[in-house]
Amino acid sequence: VQLQASGGGFVQAGGYLRLSCVASGRTINRDAVAWFRQAPGMERSFVAGINRSGSRIYAADSMKGRFTISRDSARNTVYLEMNSLRPDDTAVYYCAAGPSVISSNARNWDAYYYWGLGTLVTVSS
């Protein structure tokens, strides 16, 4: 499966962006999907994840209440809506999918098998 992330861009603090992760090659309806991000000089970190059915959602503490992950099975797409963006949200955002993700490892990058190229989000102050 190939994952294509898009929707990044330049936005002012307090702004909104919606990222999309479109899968091709096969359905990702049997995969958990997550967003990770990596800022310059920083390690890759978990942003949000969603299980196969969409019934369970995980989010990093600093994103709760601001970021929302969702999935559209018909479009084979996962979204990340980001509100109240802050300069420290500036990073390259990656989507990842994996068939073997469970609740105990959903926040770990190495639980995900498929990765897309990232999309850059820049938030100005």
Image (cartoon, helix red, strand yellow):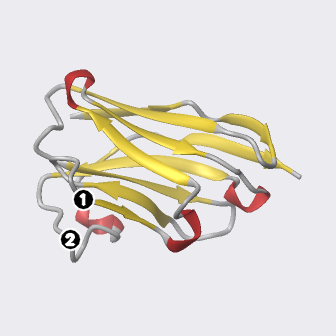
* Amino acid type, callout 1: Arg
Residue 93, horizontal then vertical, whole percent:
53, 48
Q: Are marks 2 and 1 in contact (CB under 8 Å)?
A: yes
Residue that numbered label 2 is attached to = 103
SS category of the residue bearing label 1: loop
Residue that numbered label 1 is attached to = 56
SS category of the residue bearing label 2: loop
* Amino acid type, callout 2: Ser
Viewer-proximal residue among 9 and 15: 15
Residue in view at x 24 percent, y 59 percent: 56
Residue in view at x 68 percent, y 57 percent: 89
**Number of disc labels:** 2
Where residue 8 sits, quadrant-wise, is: top right
Q: Is residue 40 above or below residue 72?
A: below
**On the picture, is 18 further left or further right than 16?**
left
Residue 52, horizontal then vertical, whole percent:
16, 48
How packed mark 2 is, by other alpha carbons closer than 10 Å (few <14, some 14-19, many 20 or more), is: few
Q: Nearer the viewer, mark 2 or mark 1?
A: 1
| Residue lying furthest right | 125
Viewer-proximal residue among 16 and 10: 16
Residue 43, horizontal then vertical, whole percent:
55, 70
- CA distance for labels 2 and 1: 9 Å
Residue in view at x 70 percent, y 53 percent: 90
- Image quadrant holding the N terminus, namely top left
Q: Is residue 80 above or below residue 9?
A: below
Residue in view at x 74 percent, y 41 percent: 15
